[in-house]
Image (cartoon, rainbow, N blue to C red):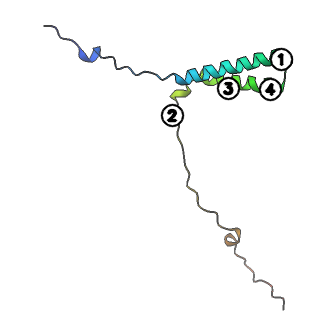
Amino acid sequence: MSLENIEANTHDTPTVDTTHELKWKRTVRRHAINILALIENDGKPTQKMNYQIRKLHEAFTYWNSDVATWVKHRLVLPTTQPVPQTELQKPEVDPIKMD
């Protein structure tokens, strides 16, 4: 009769969702292809190329980070309607009567 450690044999390790990595990988690839096409077509630096390079850098930063594990919080601050300015400052003098 052998005793098995059932708890040690179960493989309930959590799996990490990596779909965000695939999204950012595709985005990096798309911007890199766009940059190469602009280099071939324009032959000189342009605003479009600068934009694509910035978007590529942004996508690469997200792809290379742990964005998916961040916990996003939303903070809602209650506000009240502003009081009209005439109600905030009551006049200290009586109005002039022009009769």
Three-letter amino acid code of the residue under disc 4? Lys
Which one is in front, 6 or 52? 52
Going by the numbered disc 1, the residue's amino acid type is: Asn
Marks 1,3: beta carbons within 8 A: no
Which residue lies at the image location 84% right of the left edge and 88% below the top edge? 98
Name the residue beneath numbered marker 1.
41
Give left or right: position of 92 versus 80: right
The mark lying in front, picked from 1 and 3, is 1
Q: CA distance from mark 4 to mark 3?
A: 15 Å
Specify few, some or many for label 1: CA neighbours under 10 Å numbering under 14, 14-19, or 20 or more: few
The count of marks equals 4
Which one is earlier in the sequence, the residue at label 2 or at label 4? Answer: 4
Seen from the viewer's position, the closer of residues 47 and 57 is 47
Q: Position of residue 87 (x, y in %)?
A: 67, 72
Q: Residue at x 57, y 20 (%)?
A: 22
* Residue pointed to by mark 3: 58
Closest to the observer, 86 or 60: 60
Q: Residue furthest left?
A: 1
- 39 vs 92, left or right, is right
- In three-dimensional space, the C-alpha distance between marks 3 and 2, rounded to whole angstroms, equals 20 Å
Residue located beneath label 2 in the image: 71
In the rendered structure, the answer to whether residue 39 lies left or right of residue 12 reads: right
Q: Amino acid at mark 2?
A: Val
SS at circle 4: helix
Q: How far apart are labels 1 and 4 at the CA level? A: 12 Å
Q: Which mark is residue 48?
A: 4
